[in-house]
Amino acid sequence: MNPTVKKRIDLQVLQQQLKVHPGSKANFLTREDSSRDLLGKFHKDRSVWIWARRRVLQCLSYQFPCALQLKQWGILNDVKCRLCEKYYKEKNILDPPDTVESVGHIQCYCPVLQLPRIAIHHGIWRELMFSIRKSSTELNDDSEPRWLFPSALSPEAHAEWGLYKILEYMGLHEILPPGAGQNRAKLRKDIEEYHTAYAIDFDDSDIDTFIARRPDGLAFDKEKKLCVFLEYTRAMDTNEDWAEKKEQEKKNRYSSHLGFINHLSHREKSGWKASQTNFTTGVRGSLNTNQFLTRLESLGVKNKNTREAIRNRTVHKTLSMLDMILKFFFIASNFKTDWTLQNLPGPTEIVNKNMERFNLHLQPPRL
Ligand SMILES: [Zn+2]
């Protein structure tokens, strides 16, 4: 039989088989609207190192040799995270937390890998934010770009755009020179007033946390007076409802802030409305296709092909980062943990794809 025809038949049989298999692998692969179309693309991408592709495949098929899996295969007796244990021993901390070494733990929870995890979160988000800002071409009635993304310009801009600056932009708060503390005191009173009015549990010590919290990104439509908090999350995608859960968590995180801004805007009759848009990717490349594309469009990314390209890049990046965390896990398990963490690449390096020197996910150059 012609090899291409044989391949096609095999593929169709496999797809039929997936539907009748009850296991978690089949469940994961057949989940609809989750960008599964891009998994194959990643696997075929020759710019990605073959070992990285294989490790991603191991994670997708629940075959990655973490302690949980090794115990199931009868190779290890214990499911405890070996890295946690090693780290706490190095630090002479007795009674380390009891953690299970699963792919989810390594990717999302292992306390030792918190720094690389943060770097990766920033890396994926900054690339996504940059693409949105660059591709948001919708114009307003004055033929100017409809959406502005002031915090996306640089890490410094991001640090600057906290609650004070957001309110100032909408004309709901005035930033006075340092030393003019009265104005800040007024904002604190407003925050208190809002929480009391809506009977939200709150005490004095919460005010600083409330003021200090800032979303991952911001979008403003000055003409229609819209302020959108943008949030990015990378989460483990084992359970079917992982994305809804994350969406709810993110909504809860900022509901008081949005409520406060809308309350202030209503009181001052300013006409501004604040809302939130979340972007969520699953560790193993899950991404709700329709929701993601609709949200890009709502931020002015009008070109369909561009939206599709951003979806492609985001999933590709997420899968590359899955492998990067595995690498860090391996390095930290085999060398001194502190040394590994000190040699972390910064978010900028991850964004710039300047990762060859770490040999983490790109193919080494051919000599
Ligand atoms: Zn751990």
Image (cartoon, grey):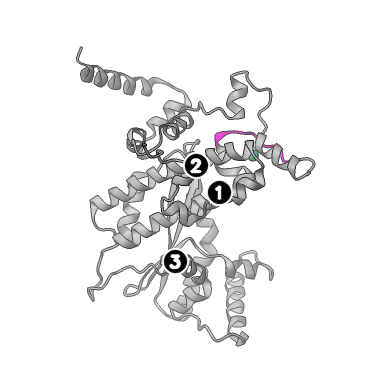
* Circles 1, 2 touching at the beta carbon (< 8 Å): yes
Task: Label 1, secondary structure: give it.
Answer: helix
Q: Left or right: where does residue 78 sit relative to residue 29?
A: right
The image position of residue 27, as x and y in percent, is 43, 29
Q: Quadrant of the N terminus?
A: top left
**What mark, if any, has residue 154 been given in the picture?**
3
Figure quadrant of residue 340: top right
The image position of residue 134, as x and y in percent, is 31, 61
The amino acid pointed to by label 2 is: Met
Q: Residue at x 75, y 40 (%)?
A: 89
Ligand 1 occupies quarter: top right
**What mark, if any, has residue 116 been given in the picture?**
1
The amino acid pointed to by label 3 is: Ser
Q: Left or right: where does residue 192 sit relative to residue 352?
A: right
Q: Circle 2 is placed at which residue position?
A: 324
The image position of residue 170, as x and y in percent, is 43, 77
Mark with earlier residue (3, 2): 3
The amino acid pointed to by label 1 is: Pro
